[in-house]
Image (cartoon, rainbow, N blue to C red):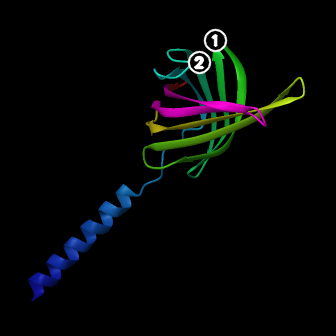
Amino acid sequence: MRIKRVLATVVLVIGIFIAIIGCGPTPDISGTWTGVLVFDQGTPLAGLSYTLTLNLTQQGNNLSGYVGLGFGPMVGLMIPIVSGTITENSISITAINTATVSDISIITTINLDGDYSKTQMSGTGDYTYTFPGAGGGLQTFTWQAQSS
């Protein structure tokens, strides 16, 4: 009887220890991340690549900041993150921007999903643009970035 009680206690302690270690805090990925976004084959922008800059601020598991897109070293478009979350090793970001050109509003949405570590992240995503009342389009891509 005593052996069963001791064994049950040991199993309980080991279970609690594993739960505590497995539930540790996510690493802080705040800062600037730079990389590339490449549009998938089968899309109108197939093979076209943009430089990708992520300016991230982390609070708990939530992310805020900007997604920057550009050509070469120039960032041409900074899109504010409206929703961003991280879990143990997964990241999900949605960034939306509305720009008005010649009285026409263009809404740009970028969704990034993937995996991350302390120094790199990568995944898949989609880029949508809409012209209210005139349509729009959807492009899919792969992306990767490294911490700067």
Above or below, 63 relative to 118: below
Magenta-drawn stretch contains 135: yes
Question: Label for residue 73?
Answer: 1
The picture places residue 75, in percent across and down from the top left corner, at 69, 18
Q: Residue furthest bottom?
A: 1
Question: Label for residue 51?
Answer: 2
- Crowd class of label 1 (few under 14; some 14 to 19; many from 20; radius 10 Å): few
Span colored in magenta? 119-144
Question: Label for residue 8?
Answer: none
The picture places residue 36, in percent across and down from the top left corner, at 53, 20
Residue at horizontal 53%, vertical 43%? 92
Where, quadrant-wise, is the C terminus in this rendering?
A: top right
The amino acid sitting under disc 2 is Thr
Magenta stretch: dominant secondary structure: strand
The quarter holding residue 20 reads bottom left
Above or below, 109 relative to 148: below
Residue at horizontal 78%, vertical 37%? 132
The picture places residue 76, in percent across and down from the top left corner, at 72, 18
Q: Please tell me which of labels 1 and 2 falls first in the chain.
A: 2
For the residue pair 119 and 69, the one nearer the viewer reads as 69
76 sits left or right of 22 in the view: right
Residue at horizontal 63%, vertical 33%? 128
Dots 1, 2 in contact, CB < 8 A: yes
Q: CA distance from mark 1 to mark 2?
A: 7 Å
Q: Residue furthest top?
A: 72
Residue at horizontal 43%, vertical 55%? 24
Above or below, 109 relative to 101: below
Helix, strand, or loop for circle 2? Answer: strand
